[in-house]
Amino acid sequence: GQSDIAEDMLRACWRMAWADGKASRVERELIGVWGMWLGWTGPQVEALAADHDPMKRSPISSGDDYKSAMTLLGIRSDTDPLSIKRAYRRLLSRHHPDKIAGSGANPQQVRVATEKTSELHNAYRVVKARRGFN
């Protein structure tokens, strides 16, 4: 119903706010205002933010980050940077939430695609940092 639509809209706002890896104060304030317009409390809106914070929700956060990242990207330790970037972009294209939504997926499938995309971003960031390339 209406509450599901409101939640989906707020989640979309948080995905966009976290797209660059951080949500600015202004972005947080705007999403908070929009949430209140939709009948949500501040803490409820902020709770949704945590679902999209790459630092809080990345499965690649401890232990053997580099190996996990390579596995997720389907690469090996000797894969060259250009091939790593290609693998990353191919996976992003395959799992991008906009593409999934455009194919008629339900909200849960779009959420899963959003999570997968975030995992791919984090994995690529880990590999780039370890290998020292942009």
Image: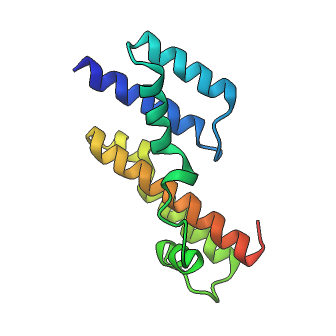
- Across the whole image, how many numbered discs are drawn on residues? 0
- Name the residue nearer the viewer: 59 or 113: 59
Q: Is residue 93 left or right of residue 27?
A: left
Residue drawn at point x = 54 percent, y = 76 percent:
63
Q: Give how far across and how far down residue 118 sits, in percent.
A: 51, 54
The residue at the far top in this view is: 37
Please state, as top left, top right, bottom left or bottom right, where the N terminus lies in the image.
Answer: top left
Q: Residue 80, position in %: x, y?
A: 68, 82
Q: Residue furthest bottom?
A: 78
Colour scheme of the picture: rainbow
| Residue 48 coordinates in the image, percent (x, y) | 44, 35
Q: Is residue 20 left or right of residue 107?
A: right
Q: Is residue 38 above or below residue 69?
A: above
Residue visible at 39% across and 18% down in the picture: 40
Q: Residue at x 45, y 50 (%)?
A: 96
When the figure is inspected, residue 3 is found, relative to residue 57, above or below; the finding is above
Q: Nearer the viewer, residue 5 or 51?
A: 51
Question: With 134 as the anchor, is 114 left or right in this view?
Answer: left
Measured along the vertical axis of the image, is residue 45 above or below residue 102? above
Q: Quadrant of the C terminus?
A: bottom right
Say which of 6 and 117 sits in front. Answer: 6
Tell me residue 21's x, y (percent). 64, 47
What residue do we see at 65% from left, 42% from top? Answer: 22
Q: Quadrant of residue 19?
A: top right
Residue closest to the far front:
43
